[in-house]
Each structure stands twice: as structure tokens, then as C-alpha cells.
Amino acid sequence: MSRGVTTDALRARLAAALDRPARPSSDYDLNPGADPGAVAWRPAGVLVAVDATGSVPRVILTKRASALRHHPGQVAFPGGKVDDGDGGPVGAALREASEEIGLPPAAVTVLGELPSHRTVTGFEVTPVLALVTVPFTPRPEPGEVDEVFAVPLSHVADPARYGIQSRLWRGQRRRYNAVPWGPYYIWGATARILRGLADRLDAA
């Protein structure tokens, strides 16, 4: 992406989306009968990083390692649970992005936080929307990340690209959002967070 006006316009578009009111989401939005009610949600932060350094803006995603115990092989944002030294979800998202994909915090401009998303695994995830303004070479963390890739923002910012699909999970039919791109099946919490951003961008 060319510098200057183009990047400024992208920043303004994302900032306008952040300013629009929106409600928190959860994995139970499409499965209300499975809602556990009041639980001790564990805080987490993920980085919704829009790379503005190339010819077109792209959202950086990971494919989790296939040997992981939880969510092996799934597409996810870089991020994880909030540790004591993080100071909150933003710190956790930046730390995890540095560890998981080698993204230096100095290359990131944080724009703000999207509404939280509660997962079936008991996390309350805060998506941190940010611009990557300095080129970097992705470095997948061995044992945690199999691949780092980027999807055009234009793809995930289009609400028409999303569908609702379902599969059996723990003996019950579970419905979820999905927004496939090429060989990558983007679904679940990741797709739901992106869908929320797409709705706000579409209305901005």
C-alpha cells in the first residue's frame, strides 16, 4: 500500500468502525440453548492486525499447530490469555503477536478495542484492532503456529462473504459463522469477530 493518504484513509475507516456502537458477541449467539449462564470468564486478548504495508490491506491470521491440545489446526488471530504482567488485553495481544508470529510491538499502531467475545472454552476475548505500519517478516512460533498468512481486508469486510454452518460438537449440533478464503477455513470465534468488524465497516 502506498504511504500517506491511502494509509490515512484506511486508518480513518477503521476508526469510524470503532466509533459505531456494537454489542459483545459469544459462541452462544447462534446456540442459545447451550449458553452456560454466569461463569468465571478468563480474560484474553487477540490482535486483529491489518497490515497496511503492502499493495492492499490484509488481516494477519495464523493456522494453529496441528499437535496442539486445544483447537489444533484452526485459523486464529495471534493472541491468548491475559498474564499478570500484560496490563490488560492490549498488552496480552501485543505480547502474544510478538511471540507467535514475530510481530514487533513497535511496528503496530493500536487503534482501539472491538466488543468482547465469549468462547465455549470459557474465555472473554477482547479483539484489539491495530494497523501494522512497518514491514516485518513473519516468524511462526514452533509448536504453536504452523503457518502465518494474510487475507485481504476487502474479503473479510464484506458481510455477504459470511455464512452460517454447523457441525457436531460434544454430541450436539453447533452453529457458527464461517468466511472461507482459498484453502483456509475461517470459522468459529475468529469468523464471528471478523463478522462484527465487517458489519461496522459496512455501516461506517
Image (cartoon, rainbow, N blue to C red):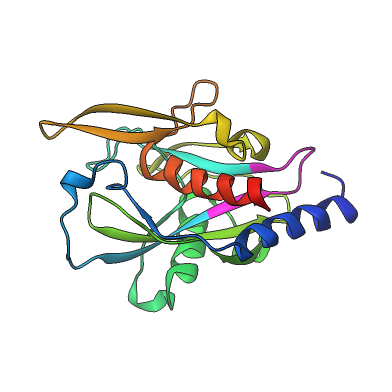
Above or below, 51 against 19 in this view is: above
Residue for point 40% across, 36% down = 177
Which quarter of the figure has residue 112?
bottom right
Count of numbered labels shown in the rendering = 0
Pinpoint residue 88: horizontal percent, then vertical percent. 42, 74
Pinpoint residue 102: horizontal percent, then vertical percent. 55, 52
Task: Give the quarter of the figure containing the N terminus.
Answer: top right
Q: Is residue 14 magenta?
A: no
Pinpoint residue 160: horizontal percent, then vertical percent. 57, 30
In the image, taking residue 38 as reference, residue 191 lies left or right, namely: right
Q: Nearer the viewer, residue 163 or 93?
A: 163
Residue for point 30% across, 47% down = 27
Magenta residues, as a range? 48-58
Residue for point 72% across, 50% down = 135
Above or below, 131 against 156 in this view is: below
Pinpoint residue 140: horizontal percent, then vertical percent. 49, 43
Q: Nearer the viewer, residue 168 or 142?
A: 168
In the image, taking residue 137 as reference, residue 179 lies left or right, namely: left
Which quarter of the figure has residue 178?
top left
In the image, taking residue 120 as reference, residue 105 lies left or right, namely: right
Q: Nearer the viewer, residue 116 or 204?
A: 204
